Image: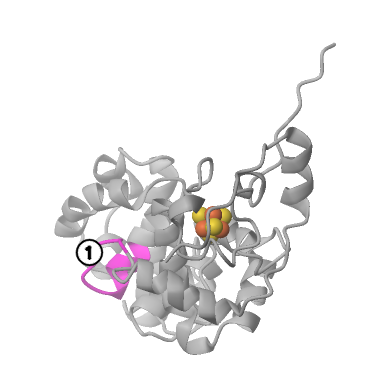
Amino acid sequence: MGGQARVPKKVTRAKVAKAALKPQISKILPAEMLTRLHAAHPDAHCELVHANAFQLLCATVLSAQTTDVNVNKATPRLFAAYPDAAAMAKAEPIDLEPYVSTLGFFRQKSKSLVNLARALIEKHGGEVPRTMNELTELAGVGRKTANVVMGVIWHAPDGVVVDTHVQRLAQRLGWTRETEPVKIEADLCNLLPRDRWDLASHILIFHGRRTCLAKKPACATCSVNDTCPSAFEAEAVGRKPIRVRRVP
Ligand code: SF4
């Protein structure tokens, strides 16, 4: 469902810097655009493989600075060895390292998972708590991780998950002018009905991975290119301004 073809405009450093700071605000209802994006990505869902809340919590912690695909390659062996908080709490971080060594920051991540499992045992009887406050009190768990678990497992997120794709898409679609995840999340929560908060992030992530790529957004085939304020100029929006090298 693409709009009429528009001529791509030349992207300059000046445009990147300007647009990254002030993305245009869309005049089309975000909920309407989200419906069209959902039609383009009806399979949008959380791609971290998990069998329960504990596994999703661990997988989300492991997904920092790497892809879901990489996490999914590592977690089957990890969860076979440490299937729940009780088993993981008894381990030492060094025990987990061989299972997650293919992921970035694996030493720190191993430590985080063991500390997380121990906190779950000490404070919550080994269960994953259900509230934002309780979740974010756990070491290594921020709003993004907590919202992933609350949205995917209990369908009751406290906000919208803002990862790098959601951040870029929200700016390109004109749903926010903010650059800090917590402020972008607040804008998205104001614009979208609560019952769509969880799915919204999955839809935006799928669209960001498949169509609205950071460097080369495929605006010509995008289902909202007739309403997106960044269409055919998107390389300049939602990315850090390009650094200009100074000649000494
Ligand atoms: S920038 Fe292009 S690809 Fe991204 S949402 Fe807008 S029209 Fe679609």
Q: In the image, is 56 to the left or to the right of 163?
A: left
Q: Mark 1: which secondary structure?
A: helix
Q: Quadrant of residue 1?
A: bottom left
**Residue 148 versus residue 242: which sits nearer the camera?**
242
**Image x and y of residue 118, in percent:** 37, 66
**Image x and y of residue 181, in percent:** 63, 63
Q: Quadrant of ligand 1?
A: bottom right
* Residue, far front: 4
Q: Is residue 197 visible?
A: yes
**Image x and y of residue 230, in percent:** 64, 56
Residue type, mark 1 in image: Ala
**Image x and y of residue 13, in percent:** 74, 34
**Residue 233 versus residue 137: which sits nearer the camera?**
233
Residue extent of the magenta highlight:
47-58
Q: Residue at x 25, y 53 (%)?
A: 72
Rendered view: 66 above or below 32: above
Q: In the image, is 208 to the left or to the right of 54?
A: right
**Label 1 sits on residue:** 87
- Crowd tier of the residue under label 1, counting other residues whose Cα lies within 10 Å: few below 14, some 14–19, many 20 or above: some
Q: Quadrant of residue 177?
A: bottom right
Q: Quadrant of residue 82?
A: bottom left
Q: In the image, is 179 to the left or to the right of 223?
A: right
Q: Residue at x 66, y 65 (%)?
A: 174
Rendered view: 162 above or below 101: below
**Residue 6 versus residue 79: which sits nearer the camera?**
6
**Quadrant where the image shows the C terminus:** top right
Q: Is residue 52 magenta?
A: yes
Q: Is residue 135 magenta?
A: no
Q: In the image, is 201 to the left or to the right of 53?
A: right
Rendered view: 172 above or below 33: above
